[in-house]
Image (cartoon, helix red, strand yellow):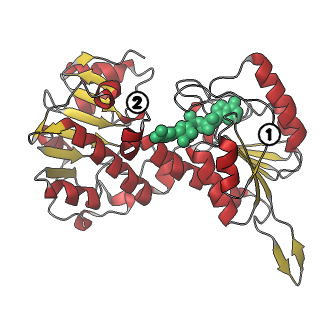
């Protein structure tokens, strides 16, 4: 089997789907690893850091790959340069991506979108949503600390005592909990908020206070459900009353398959103190704040709102290492008797499959 990866071409993407560590493991199993020249360079892995790996130009890589691993989808035309029957694995962003699905089908490819993996215990080692969300949460809080006009920690100096910043994290999933842990290491005073009741204990175990707004919305599969209009109004009212003391709000709230819930309205932002900062991690899927503009910095009435995009690409070395391990664990499900033979009776295989030998499976 030849497993391959290209240089990622999405804007500002620096991660790579196959790291030197992953390549070494694959080589140990007798798998051939073929990379485009410079594939890992932006992540901190120059070609020379890969041992026993072949490098070639993109066309040659695509012409020989049995399995192409990617972080984000390449241009649709890239799929047309693969051989009929090859396999593609990555975060393929399938929602609303008809052209991409058509390009995958045209070449009779079999493609798996890792973000569709059910988040069962068995899938944990392949869970790219978790591994990359942890990077995002960490990065979001560092961006907040950098942009905040105040120090995060308390400082006692000859020039007076500095009080610690007050930080609120909205949404205490994988990213939010990592954001809380990061703010805590920086010495801020933190509160965490979520609509899933079980997050109280998780927030508190990180040394933060749980902000209880009295709205509970546990959904299925460990996720939150979307709030009703009434619940949303109650949440906004309660949150508006609590926002005033915070210097920093990092929001990470999401509901699978839905646009990000709008939690912070313009009026709520106008009620925050001047100099306050919002880092809206949900910017990519519409934003948790009504004023967020994806990828931009907005200043409204003295409050700054940042909507950073592709946060995991900002810590590409570790993000790639985790991602490459996730990919490797997933690909193990596809290989039987030294050949690529996905077992479609396995729910992890079946549920992440977009296209099977050219036939479109994903309709979502
Ligand atoms: P996510 O990215 O879908 O959402 C982020 C957070 O936003 C969630 O905690 C959610 O409850 C919260 N949220 C949604 N709507 C909100 C609202 N209106 N107001 C406030 N908060 C809101 O979530 P995630 O981080 O991908 O995962 C969520 C859960 O799934 C976590 O409990 C995580 O531990 C669990 N999970 C389980 C496994 C497993 O192996 N069983 C694997 C991964 C994740």
Q: Secondary structure at mark 2?
A: helix
Tell me if residue 324 comes above or below residue 292 in the rendering: below
Q: Which residue is mark 1?
A: 212
Give residue 226's mark: none
Residue 44 image-quadrant placement = bottom left
Give the residue at mark 2. 116
Residue 291 location, x and y as percent? 74, 34
Which residue lies at the image location 58% right of the left edge and 50% below the top edge?
137
Mark 2 vs mark 1: in front: 1
Quarter of the render that holds ligand 1: top right
* Mark closer to the chain start, 2 or 1: 2
Q: Nearer the viewer, residue 17 or 166?
A: 166
**Residue 211 location, x and y as percent?**
79, 44
Residue 2, position as x, y percentages in the image: 13, 45
- Is the distance from the Cβ of mark 1 to the nearest ligand 1 atom less than 8 Å? no
Q: Is residue 122 visible?
A: yes
Work out whether 103 lies above or below 342. Answer: above
Measured Cα–Cα span from mark 2 to mark 1: 31 Å
Q: Nearer the viewer, residue 346 or 126?
A: 346
Quarter in which the N terminus is drawn: top left
Does 310 sit above or below residue 256? below
């Amino acid at each position: 089997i030849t497993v391959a990866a290209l240089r990622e071409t999405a804007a500002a993407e620096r991660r790579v789907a196959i790291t030197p560590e992953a390549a070494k493991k694959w080589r140990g199993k007798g798998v051939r690893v073929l990379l485009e020249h410079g594939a890992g360079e932006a992540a901190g892995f120059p070609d020379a850091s890969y041992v026993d790996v072949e490098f070639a130009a993109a066309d040659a890589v695509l012409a020989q790959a049995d399995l192409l691993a990617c972080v984000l989808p390449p241009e649709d035309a890239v799929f047309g340069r693969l051989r009929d029957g090859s396999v593609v694995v990555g975060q393929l962003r399938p929602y609303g991506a008809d052209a991409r699905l058509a390009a995958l089908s045209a070449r009779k490819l079999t493609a798996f979108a890792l973000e569709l993996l059910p988040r069962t215990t068995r899938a944990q080692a392949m869970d790219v949503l978790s591994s990359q969300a942890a990077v995002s949460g960490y990065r979001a809080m560092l961006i907040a600390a950098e942009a905040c006009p105040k120090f995060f920690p308390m400082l006692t100096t000859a020039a007076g005592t500095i009080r610690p910043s007050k930080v609120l994290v909205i949404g205490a999933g994988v990213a939010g909990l990592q954001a809380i842990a990061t703010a805590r290491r920086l010495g801020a005073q933190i509160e965490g908020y979520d609509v899933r009741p079980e997050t109280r204990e998780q927030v508190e175990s990180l040394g933060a206070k749980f902000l209880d707004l009295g709205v509970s919305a546990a959904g299925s599969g460990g996720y939150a459900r979307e709030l009703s209009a009434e619940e949303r109004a109650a949440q906004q009212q309660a949150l508006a009353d609590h926002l005033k003391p915070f210097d920093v709000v990092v929001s990470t709230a999401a509901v699978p398959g839905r646009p990000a819930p709008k939690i912070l309205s313009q009026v709520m932002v106008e009620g925050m103190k001047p100099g306050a900062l919002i880092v809206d991690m949900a910017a990519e899927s519409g934003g948790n704040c009504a004023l967020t503009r994806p990828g931009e910095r907005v200043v409204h009435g003295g409050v700054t709102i940042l909507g950073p995009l592709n946060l995991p690409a900002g810590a590409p070395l570790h993000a790639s290492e985790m991602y490459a391990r996730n990919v490797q664990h997933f690909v193990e499900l596809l290989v039987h008797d030294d050949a690529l033979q996905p077992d479609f009776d396995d729910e992890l295989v079946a549920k992440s499959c977009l296209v099977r030998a050219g036939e479109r499976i994903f309709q979502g």
